[in-house]
Image (cartoon, rainbow, N blue to C red):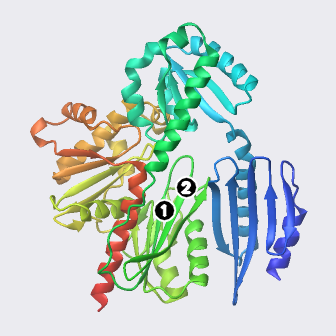
Amino acid sequence: MILNDYQTWIEAQNTDGFTRVKEAEGYRLETEYADGAVVFHELEEYLIVEMRITEKKSGEDQFFLHFELNDLNHAEELYHEMIEALLDLKDRQKTKILLCCTAGLTTGFFAMKLNETAEFLNLDYEFNAVPYENVFEEGFHYQAVLLAPQTGYLLPKVKEIFTDKPVLQIPAKVFASYDAAGCVEFVKEELENYAKTEEEKALTRIRNCDEMKGRILCIAHVPDVEKTRVVYRLYEDGVVKDSGEVLKQKRSYRDIIDLLDSLYCSKDPFDIIGITVPGIVEREGYVFQNSGDEMDYGAYIREKYGIDCVLINNVNAAVYGIYASQEKYSSITLHSQPRGYVNGGIGSVVKGEPLLGRKGVAGELRYILPSMNYEEEPVLQKKMWQPEAVYDLVSKGLSLTIAMYDPEKIYVRCDLTPDMEEMKQYLLKLIPEKYIPELEYVSETDIAEYMVRGLLILCVEKLAQKK
């Protein structure tokens, strides 16, 4: 009955901006730039809905989730979110390239010429210009960053932050003569070369789990200001049997419940389930959101499925994954500062044991920074795209970590602060050099792997305790 009601509701929704075709298994959605699908899977007494949007140009999924259809209001909300994501892709079809100079005026004129040339050559390029002070806020929304010759000395710093896209300096001769055709050809060649390099770097990194027994489902929530990833991986006796991720533009703790329900419906029983989440995780299993809402994942899993679980804050899981990946240190700390976030988190391992605290609040910087005479959060939020401001913010958090735990090594996950030598210079303003431990940068690519790895080890440890 709920399926019929949901289908009736879907068919009553408007289709402005896309086409919708009913098929045997659900609905096919299409625009000139993306394909979408709403597919219904009947698994015995369960009904699973799968939603997917695939960008035609890249072939990459831009939205993907599946959930058990048992709440019509929730299903309607997810459909609206999917359509919003589908329509938003319209503005992302062109290869967006950001030009940067000291003031933006010269590059603004050049950007206009480049757009005219790209249109004449029938290339899907869109050029926009900003002054240098805005490049770190705007650059994350572009596929490439071009620096004018007069800002070429900043190239190394910009490259360190935008590690997932080409950062190029416009040849002086091309820029000086406003050779738009020459610049477009230069960009075209560099983008093609970069794409080849990225394909070569696409390697799967997974820990050797030959000695691990049982069926273990790991789910890691990796938040970001632009997109939330919920990564899942199913291990059977240490071998990866299934993996994937939910991609959404809006973050909701319900995403994990939907994923958990649908995976449980379609897979053999698990021996243990591990989940990492942002927020405070109490020993009893509560997860607190910033809004004050709470979700008791531990009780949900044990009551609904009768399966034991490991529930842990995502930074705490990641630091344990890092700890297990090295043999040199017994006490380490991870400072995690997702880009655009004012309040980061600290995870620590002390003498081989994760430091969680009595109520799981250990490392929650949101309860520390206001007492350190920081600016009001709305003021600070505006600075969160300026590397200098973020280096200052993170270094203060690191100085606190050093004074409290004195770790042997600190790992830093923050897109805007990749240079650990520069971080050390900020730290030297706060603490004597002899107390500063070794610092190492952790990329966004690696952080999800560390979360899953730490969670997996904690699940294995808990299974071993039950034997």
Up-down: is 206 above or below 172? below
The secondary element bearing badge 2 is classed as: strand
Q: Nearer the viewer, residue 36 or 16?
A: 36
Q: Nearer the viewer, residue 107 or 77?
A: 107
The residue carrying mark 2 is 228
Name the outermost residue toward the left: 434
Q: Position of residue 314 (x, y in %)?
A: 40, 61
Residue at screen point 55% across, 75% down:
260
Q: Position of residue 434 (x, y in %)?
A: 9, 39
Name the N-terminal-most of marks 1 and 2: 1
Q: Amino acid at mark 2?
A: Thr
Q: How many marks?
A: 2
Horizontal placement of 30 versus 220: left or right? right
Residue at screen point 12% across, 42% down:
435
Up-down: is 146 above or below 420? above
> Which quadrant would the N terminus be assigned to in this image?
bottom right
Q: Nearer the viewer, residue 170 or 432?
A: 170
Can the viewer see residue 374?
Answer: no
Up-down: is 6 above or below 107? below
Up-down: is 343 above or below 235? above
Q: Position of residue 234 (x, y in %)?
A: 47, 76
Can the viewer see residue 77?
Answer: yes
The residue carrying mark 1 is 221
Q: Residues within 10 Å of mark 1 (few under 14, many from 20)?
A: many
Q: Position of residue 382 (x, y in %)?
A: 50, 32
Horizontal placement of 453 versus 383: left or right? left
Q: Find the distance from the CA under tag 1 to the CA under tag 2.
A: 8 Å
Q: Nearer the viewer, residue 239 or 266?
A: 239
Residue contact between numbered discs 1 and 2, judged by CB atoms under 8 Å: yes
Residue 379 bears which disc, if any?
A: none
Q: Amino acid at mark 1?
A: His
